Image: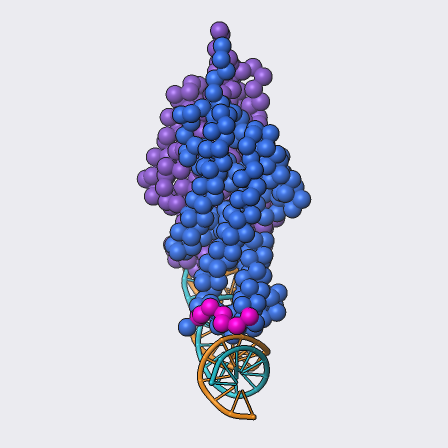
Chain colours: A purple, B blue, C orange, D cyan
Amino acid sequence: MPEEPKTARGRRTRERIVASAAGLIERQGVEATSLDQVLTEAEASKSQLYHYFADKQALVRAVIAWQTASLVGGMAERLAQIDSWAALEAWFEALVAHQEALNCRVGCPIGSLAAELADTDEAARQDLARSFDGWAAQLHTMLDRLRERGLLRPDADTAQSAYAVLATIQGGLLLAKTTRDPQRLRIALAAAGGYLRSLAPAPRV
Amino acid sequence: MPEEPKTARGRRTRERIVASAAGLIERQGVEATSLDQVLTEAEASKSQLYHYFADKQALVRAVIAWQTASLVGGMAERLAQIDSWAALEAWFEALVAHQEALNCRVGCPIGSLAAELADTDEAARQDLARSFDGWAAQLHTMLDRLRERGLLRPDADTAQSAYAVLATIQGGLLLAKTTRDPQRLRIALAAAGGYLRSLAPAPRV
DNA sequence: ATTAGATTGGACCGTTCAGTCCAGTTCTTG
DNA sequence: CAAGAACTGGACTGAACGGTCCAATCTAAT
């Protein structure tokens, strides 16, 4: 029954709904966001929503895809430019600044969705797992570049380090969001940076 | 209106309600857990619940206190015994084993509550922030002990490292829960261990 | 044993919410 | 421009949920 929009107008409507839902869910969580709220903000009606989505879960999965695209996509260019410790730490600092600007109020959209949905929505859980893996893969690529440049030991396990960095980012965001203190994120990221630096080649003695 | 139980029977009832709520919330989250569900499992009635709790939020805060006591309390003795890298890594491995046994289905109760409630319940957010800080304080004590034993450099910032370790644990648990792969937690913890080891005194050359 | 207070059972209420339905409008295409 | 398909508005439904209420029962201390 629910289909992809076939006209430009339909596409705009669908996009408006998903974008509104993404914003509200990011700020309030899935359960706390009602469809009526989404529709009011998107200036759409029930029948429009159910024209494009089978049910709320389908909308949520569309939001996951939307957030994954915007977040992981937006990160790609930034990560592609990291080729030194200074650049890495500048990125970290940008993440902190972003949280600071938002008063630590949202954390990571993917992380928040994962925490809320992993228990209750198996399909969403899998989407989110893939989303995390995509993010980790980008970090992996970045770390491989650092290793090629000689900043990491040749035998450093960049795949594992990518997961570790991702975990530290997520945990730091959670602590920052809970305490409303961006400093927690900064500390976590500094440790992640310290860990990576500990994988640098031993200085010649 | 809602008061502490004044008789042994009342105390048992209240305890049964909180324990059931804690279990259900741990597995399903706050919003997905209804009061009727809690009452069925606790074999109690509505009036019993509302005799001891003003509303659902009050029950949730009691659950937070309960989880904090059981988790942070239970951790105290374990952390108090850590005085070597081997002991630290054994603790990490125990955390992984615990998740493995649970099929990565719950993560950290405090962390899950924090992710769900930080946006929507200010009082709960503050409770959870304190809970995290209590946990971090215990890690801090443990790291101070390691430093005293000469395993960490005298100038190592153990307070910050405690936050960093906590963040990595939380992030690792979130990734493990989302991907249902305990390996993610193991990797994250290995990195946390690696980071701490990088704070060891430089070997004499 | 009496009695005041603590505790309990569960019917009931009002609201909110996801989801349905259909009549009406707008687009697209031959 | 005709007709079918795509899209839209919004009233409506049924169930679930948090919360209320009051009469009944239990407990403990006199």
Which residue: 40% across, 28% down?
A91
The region drawn magenta spans B2-8
- Residue B151 within the segment the image draws in magenta: no
Which residue: 49% across, 33% down?
B145
Can residue B122 be seen here? The reply is yes
Name above or below for residue A143 compared with residue B91: above
- Residue B6 within the segment the image draws in magenta: yes
Give B133 or A37, whichever is nearer the viewer. B133
Give D11 or D25, whichever is nearer the viewer. D25
- The dominant secondary structure in magenta is loop
- Would you say B10 lies left or right of B160 here? right
The percent coordinates of residue A124 (x first, y second) are 57, 46
Which residue: 37% across, 31% down?
A94
Seen as rendered, the residue at the extreme right is B101
The answer to which image quadrant residue D26 occupies is bottom right
The percent coordinates of residue B48 (x first, y second) are 53, 72
The percent coordinates of residue B116 (x first, y second) are 47, 51
